[in-house]
Image (cartoon, rainbow, N blue to C red):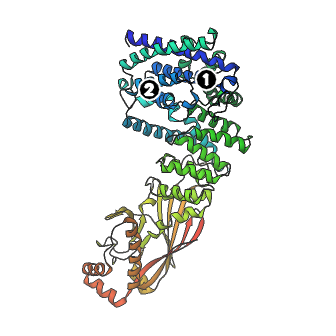
Amino acid sequence: MGWRTRTCRRQLLLGCGVFLAFFALLCSAPAASSDVGPPRAGEAQEDGSVQLQVLQALNQIAVSLTHIITYNDKVVLDQEYNAIINNLNLNKIPDADIISLLQELMDLLTSSKIQEHERAALSRTYEKNMQNELKKRLRKRILETDLLLNPYMGVLNAVLNMGSFYFNYRDRMDDYKKEREEAAWKIEAATLQGLNNFYKKLLKYSWDLMRRYQLPDEWRLNEKQLSDYTAILKEADIERRYRKLERLESAFQKFPPYWYYRGQAAYEMGNAKEALFCFTQFQNIHQGILRKDPFAASTAMHKIMLTAQHASPAEIRRDLDVVLANSDDEDWGNILFAALQYARLGDKDTAGRLILRNLDNGYLTFIEDPDMMRAMGPALLLEARSDVFDRIMDAVLKNDKIKNYDVLWLYGQLRNRDILRRIQGEFDHVLLLAENKSWLNPLNVFRGDNLALLLPTRWMADNLTVQLRLMDDEGEYTFQPSETAPLRNYPEVTVLTFKDVLSAKKFIKKRRQARIAVSLMREKLAEDRSTQEAYTIEMVFTTLIVPSEEQEAKIVKYSSFLFADTGRAAPKTAERSASEKGRQPESEKKVDEAEGYALWFAKEKLVLNGESFRWSDDGIRF
């Protein structure tokens, strides 16, 4: 950086220090509620509210400029523009000259703001970081046996630790910058020079206000104090950061963000008493200068977590009101936090509205993969409104990453049969075949004594073991699939072939009967500390000897399930039958016409992790 830039930085920090001097006036002023409107005529001068409003507005501008020039980062500039400078509540700035200064500053910064596509890319990175943070924090908790009893706290702590994008970007600036060249993030020299020119007007106003309000010079924060404060916020060692912030108390005690950062450091250290003291101090001096204040939202969230075990529902609701009043739609982490807190309080209507708000705005990170679904599912669905339940389950079932085993795990946690009903159609797509007459087998791939299981591909997962057991009057036999491949032209269905299981013709001639059980066993995840060894689905079939026409009708019925879900048109039955006959060997036609019977594997029951359900060709019976 050249001498012009360094000079600009020093002058700007000096101007900011003068402005922060005004915060000292708050020492003698009563705390005002953040939801109080503009003062009535004749009231302002009596309680000093006009002075407080002016001084806090100037203070916010000064600190924003300090951050912009110190970080020299376009994203920080963009954040300060949107979250602070363009977010000031003009109803609480009665001085028109200050508003004019604000407009001039906004014009100066506009050219250096990041573009919409850059903002969108950062948002995607933030969502990815949030997902990774939730996974990391919850990996040791998501499968604990007490999850159903307390499904909220681990998720809430993870969301809280991540913070909104305003805080997360500064905490992980290096990670965000890895995706772009370092130079692309720096502020242009012309903008820094413009800030230097703006400083001159700012300095004049600062001295005018000091004389007007007779402010003593000892309240002025100097350049070194400002530099030290900003450097401390970058300190990676949390305990060292806390100690350094504690030593600044005498100078910064009436500056609300100071108490937020100090409280957040104490919270991460596990010092709950000190953290609660700091967050309470923030709320006591907070004046509501910003329309949407990220510090106020995060402070309220931390305070809720610290007081959740002993605070009254009314107290928690007041802090939740603060969270929501200071969060925009893109602050979906804050909204999720509030939704889970309302659910914990038993207010499923409010929780439902907030979950739908996130879903309507396209924020699905919290249910986008199996780990997240397992972590968030119980808390989101426990006592959920029916419309919220349906929206969440719709999103889950549309996601190919999430397998049916994950959904069944969720059912096992909540014992909510509505979850099972949502995937019962998956069992309609299960079919066990032995003969080579079907249009589903145009190439005669199910030859000889082989059996083929047609299974929805969503059942195919990593660490999956499939086994077929044949039980008849001769004993019990076990088989493993010899081949596994998608059904041709229908990747939604996978065909598992079991070789040399039984001869359908012999079964028909001798009128034999058998039961066949196909088990799908998925290994327990490594971090699962429950007593359950694996997640098992067992599908039990009974052999029936039926007229060939009946078997054909059943296969057509199966095809209707298949085509209905894939959106493709099934061939007409007559055309299908004719084409099949054309492919059959002449000798087989004669046998079929003479006997007129076929072997059908009728669905009997499902056993899901030890729980049995009646099952038939018409579906699951609850």
| Marking on residue 532 | none
Drawn side of residue 176 relative to residue 162, left or right: left
**Amino acid marked by disc 1:** Tyr
Q: Is residue 355 above or below residue 86?
A: below
Q: Residue furthest front?
A: 42
Residue to which mark 1 is pinned: 258
Q: Is residue 344 above or below residue 610?
A: above
How far across and how far down the image is residue 540, in percent?
52, 71
Nearest the viewer among 410 and 166 is: 166
**Amino acid marked by disc 2:** Met
How far across and how far down the image is residue 334, in percent?
56, 40
Drawn side of residue 467 relative to residue 350, left or right: left
Task: Give the foreground label among 1 and 2.
Answer: 2
Q: Looking at the figure, which quarter contains the N terminus?
A: top left
Label 2 sits on a secondary structure element that is helix
Residue to which mark 2 is pinned: 106
How far across and how far down the image is residue 91, in percent?
57, 31
> What residue is at 55 percent from the left and 12 percent from the top?
208
